[in-house]
Image (cartoon, rainbow, N blue to C red):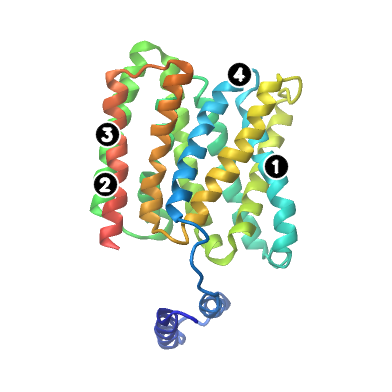
Amino acid sequence: MRPLFCYLRFGIFHRNKKVSSSKDDSPERREADTTMPEACNRPVTGPAFNPYFALVAGVLAVSTGAIFVRLATDAPALVIAAYRVGLASAIIVPLAWFKVRAELQSLTRRELALAGLSGFFLALHFGTWISSLGYTSVANSVVLVNTNPLWVGLFTPLITGERIKPAVALGILISVAGGIIIGIGDFATGGEALLGDMLALTGSVCAAFYLLLGRNLRRKLSLLAYICVCYASAAVILWLLVLILRLPVTGFSGSTYACFWAMALITQLIGHSSYNWALKWFSTSLIAVSLLGEPVGSTVMAYFLFDEGLTTAKVIGGIFILSAIILSVVGEGRSS
């Protein structure tokens, strides 16, 4: 049985389109008119298990990413990123080709170009973030890289023309203050930590551009098809950089290879897939807030595994940043 809101939304959608069709009867607009009935034709079924379990599993799995990077001590940062996305793609691409081959073959050149650009920013995100862990602490790196919701709010007006909501603007200011507090504390102990913070922040900005560029693709493509194209393009870019820079790709310790597979299977496939699955049952705001559990989980793990202490500046700066993200997400949800 199809939900009533599908018929109501589809009717309103087409009534509005009919009024404006004289102004814009482009192929893109006519193509958009055909997307709503397909969404309404999908069967409505309940979740196979409690969606909150997926959120908890996602937090725990994603929190291991920074830990595995620190444990892969004998591999360069770009090589770690290349193995992470490459191994995940080696699993996703055959699965997507088997499940959604027709959809992949029907992609337009524009869709492929946008997916490639999204993969480019995803590759930069992984490369800069993983590199940051070689210079700064796990706590600093994970907290700063998770400020991407704030950057999404900052760049949305430039890309989509939408206005920044007051809560998002306030959140950006608070997060900048938190970043300055963390940066000052690191600079007092050495310039390398500050460099790591900047790399983590760059990774966050790249993640924001990846999300903004992929927004239209996510509306058209299935989840499996989108992950296949983006991850594969990111893997190609990272491996090209590794080969161009002539970085070592073999000869690592057995524990490092184990970390490569752990990042691909646990952090990438289980962690990210859990969040993507939960998006069907929870609002985007709730998913974004749950992602803030990553720096908490990573910091706790780093404390026990690496005996990594927390300075007052790190604690205060982290509280500023996490509070800013929560404020932005909650404010966005209330005003929508």
Q: Nearer the viewer, residue 131 or 87?
A: 87
For marks 1 and 4, the one nearer the N-term is 4
User: On the image, numbered disc 4 is attached to which residue?
Assistant: 73
The residue depicted at 50 percent of the width and 57 percent of the height is: 49
The residue depicted at 42 percent of the width and 17 percent of the height is: 308
User: On the image, numbered disc 2 is attached to which residue?
Assistant: 327
The residue depicted at 45 percent of the width and 23 percent of the height is: 302
Three-letter amino acid code of the residue under disc 2: Leu
**C-alpha span from label 2 to label 3:** 10 Å
Three-letter amino acid code of the residue under disc 4: Thr
Three-letter amino acid code of the residue under disc 1: Val
For marks 1 and 2, the one nearer the N-term is 1
Q: Residue furthest front?
A: 49
Mark 2, other Cα within 10 Å: few <14 / some 14–19 / many ≥20:
many
Q: Quadrant of residue 234?
A: top right
Q: Are marks 1 and 3 in contact (CB under 8 Å)?
A: no
Q: Are marks 3 and 4 in contact (CB under 8 Å)?
A: no
State whether residue 335 is above or below residue 184: below
For marks 4 and 2, the one nearer the N-term is 4
| Figure disc tally | 4
Mark 1, other Cα within 10 Å: few <14 / some 14–19 / many ≥20:
some
Numbered disc 3: secondary structure: helix
Q: Quadrant of residue 181?
A: top left
User: On the image, numbered disc 3 is attached to which residue?
Assistant: 320
For marks 1 and 3, the one nearer the N-term is 1
Instruction: Give me the disc on residue 236.
Output: 1
Q: Are marks 2 and 3 in contact (CB under 8 Å)?
A: no
Q: Position of residue 103 (x, y in %)?
A: 68, 66
State whether residue 308 is above or below residue 67: above
**C-alpha span from label 4 to label 2:** 37 Å
